[in-house]
Image (cartoon, rainbow, N blue to C red):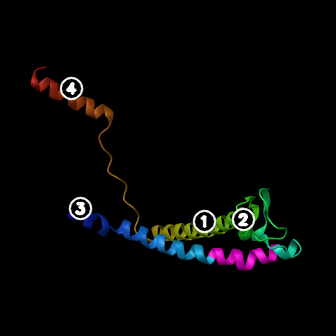
Amino acid sequence: MIKEFRNFIAKGNVMDLAVGIIIGAAFTAIVQSLVHDLINPVIGQILGGIDFTSMYVVLSGDVPPGSSLEVARESGAAVFAYGAFLTAVINFLIIAWVVFLLVKGVNRIKDAAVEKGEPVPAAPKGPTQEQLLTDIRDLLKTRGV
């Protein structure tokens, strides 16, 4: 079992996946900083100086007017935190866009490598259905069936 596990871990795909997860986590931190530190302040200025991430509506409970989202949550009130949700949507869209651009770039590089490289030989064709049926018939004849 340990040998199987070692072989599984040593496979290139597992290592590639691990590297991808680590880079993805680091990239997520960069995107979150981009959204929180650069995009949200601009949106806040457009909306009149409002802190975009702290936008919420109190559904039930007592929250002092003008309190931050953290204070509202700590007070135990039920809040509809649409600003935090919009921030998550912006994070997702940025990450999805960058991943799209990366995949597009990698595909372009792969296509260029295939075009410049040797032509890929066609897979050998197998026998047709008629040839297989003819061979089966001939085998049955030789066996006397």
For the residues labelled 3 and 4, the Cα–Cα distance comes to 45 Å
Which residue corresponds to mark 2? 75
Q: Nearer the viewer, mark 3 or mark 1?
A: 3
Looking at numbered disc 3 in the image, what kind of residue is underneath it?
Glu
Q: Name the one closer to the observer, 77 or 109.
A: 77
Looking at numbered disc 4 in the image, what kind of residue is underneath it?
Arg
Q: Nearer the viewer, mark 4 or mark 2?
A: 2
Which element type, helix, strand or loop, lies under badge 4? Answer: helix
Which residue is at 80% across, 60% downward? 57
The circle drawn on residue 4 is 3
Which residue corresponds to mark 1? 100
Placement of the N terminus among the 4 image quadrants: bottom left
* Left or right for 38, reference 21: right
Which residue is at 26% across, 63% downward? 5
* Left or right for 24, reference 129: right
For the residues labelled 4 and 2, the Cα–Cα distance comes to 83 Å
Please provide percent x and percent y for residue 68: 77, 71
Q: Which residues are magenta?
A: 31-43
Q: Name the one closer to the observer, 70 or 113.
A: 70
Quadrant in which residue 73 is drawn: bottom right
Please provide percent x and percent y for residue 143: 10, 25
Which residue is at 18% across, 28% downward? 138
The circle drawn on residue 137 is 4
